[in-house]
Image (cartoon, rainbow, N blue to C red):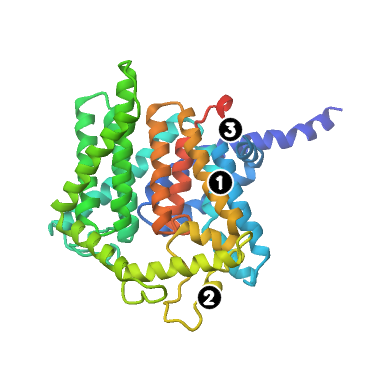
Amino acid sequence: MKAALSRVEEPAVVSGLLQRYALPPLRAVTILLGFSVAISVALDNVLLALLLPGVLFNARAIAQISAQNPAARASWLLFGVLFLAMFYGETPLSGAVDILGKYADLAFVPLFMLMLSAGVDRRRAQYAFLAAMGVTLLLSWLVGLKILPVQHWMWKGITAENPAIFRSYITHGNMMAFAAFLALLNLREAASRGARLAWGLFALLGVINVLFMVQGRTGYMIMMALLAWFAWATLSRIMRRRGMPWDWRHGVAVALIFAGVAAAAYHASSRLHERINLMASEYRVWQPNQGRETSTGQRLDFYYNSLQIVRQYPVFGVGTGGYAAAFAQQTLGTDVIKTTNPHNEYLLVAVQTGMIGLGLLLYLFYTLWRCAPLLNTPFEQDAARGLVLAYLVNCAFNSPLHDHADGLLFAFMTAVLFAGLRRGKQHV
């Protein structure tokens, strides 16, 4: 009888030992991802590979998180429809699997949440990302001021006039905008003068870097959206704390003030002024399928033809991985540049998975926005909604969930911010 009981208990004991000794290094690997996501694709891939054993040892816990945490559930639903869409359409399965792999970060969300279940680990993960962006910011300023020459290990397109260090100038601007926003939130929460000075300097240099040094126009728009949200959220909290009502008139006042600040920034920066004017002039002269000569025109051609494909396949789309072939067929006989990516996540998902997939993408953002007020601290609540705003903007001009660095950052920060969603408040 004892031998039989021993055989029954042995797997549980082994599993417990594996969890006891495997989880701490896996947590460290997850935290380190916060640093690597801003620095190195190769290191990202190594760390993600090291995390895979965490799935084997914690399958039940991951499934439970996926079922109970709305943010994880919504991420898996979007990944799930992309998985199912591999099995229809004309794309070979190998090609469909390759495209699905670009969205695999969504499937990692519950695993990241498991590894970051403790508040101290979530703070470390956030600081790891901010540390990487701090290094990036310092190097960007040194290169931009021509104190440091361009190095061979930096982004291949870097110049002193466009000092993006480790990622493309588009990704650099997107990430720096979010990092500056997090610095502002940390400034708001800081208890000491030294901490306030450090976070304030980080935020100021980050905002300047995005708006006046790096050329990514998406970064401009994300930065402005996040600054507006920070002002709105902070002022509303101050007024409620003082027992004063916050209504639409205060919101209008904030919007008008911020519009004035944006106008001042527009006129103060010749680079910002020139790039926005260039985009506006290119938009005015664009005609369908005749935008080959300008970057704005090319994107508008991508959007126009992607919408035509969605009209033809409105419900289920053409299948995961089918965008390139569908776009080539749609633009056959025209002078439109062929592309595998429309630089718009909403259209890329809609073409591949139809209105079902687009609905699940919007449902993911809606879920994160709705659950944000249920988080434990004002920092988490406002940071979570800032994450949603950043990616709502980003998805309109790029395909961030399809791109490695932006997609991994989204999955990682979703886990950092929503892993602490209290169990009793997760039913939405």
Residue at 53 percent across and 56 percent down: it is: 103
Q: Left or right: 114 with respect to 119?
A: right
Name the residue that disc number 3 marks: 428
Q: Of the two numbered discs 1 and 2 on the same chain, state the one appearing first in sequence.
A: 1
Residue at 50 percent across and 61 percent down: it is: 348
Q: Of the two numbered discs 3 and 2 on the same chain, state the one appearing first in sequence.
A: 2
Is residue 6 depicted above or below 155 in this figure? above
Is residue 230 depicted above or below 100 in this figure? above
Q: Nearer the viewer, residue 112 or 233?
A: 233
The outermost residue toward the top is 243
Mark 1 crowd level (few <14, some 14–19, many ≥20, 10 Å Cα): many
Q: Is residue 131 visible?
A: no
Picture disc at residue 105: none
Quadrant position of the C terminus in the picture = top right
Mark 3 crowd level (few <14, some 14–19, many ≥20, 10 Å Cα): few
Name the residue that disc number 1 marks: 75
Residue at 46 percent across and 45 percent down: it is: 412
Name the residue that disc number 2 marks: 330
Q: x, y (%) of residue 224?
A: 29, 46
Q: Amino acid at mark 2?
A: Gln
Mark 1–mark 3 distance (CA, rounded to whole Å): 15 Å
Q: Left or right: 235 with respect to 72?
A: left
Residue at 66 percent across and 39 percent down: it is: 60
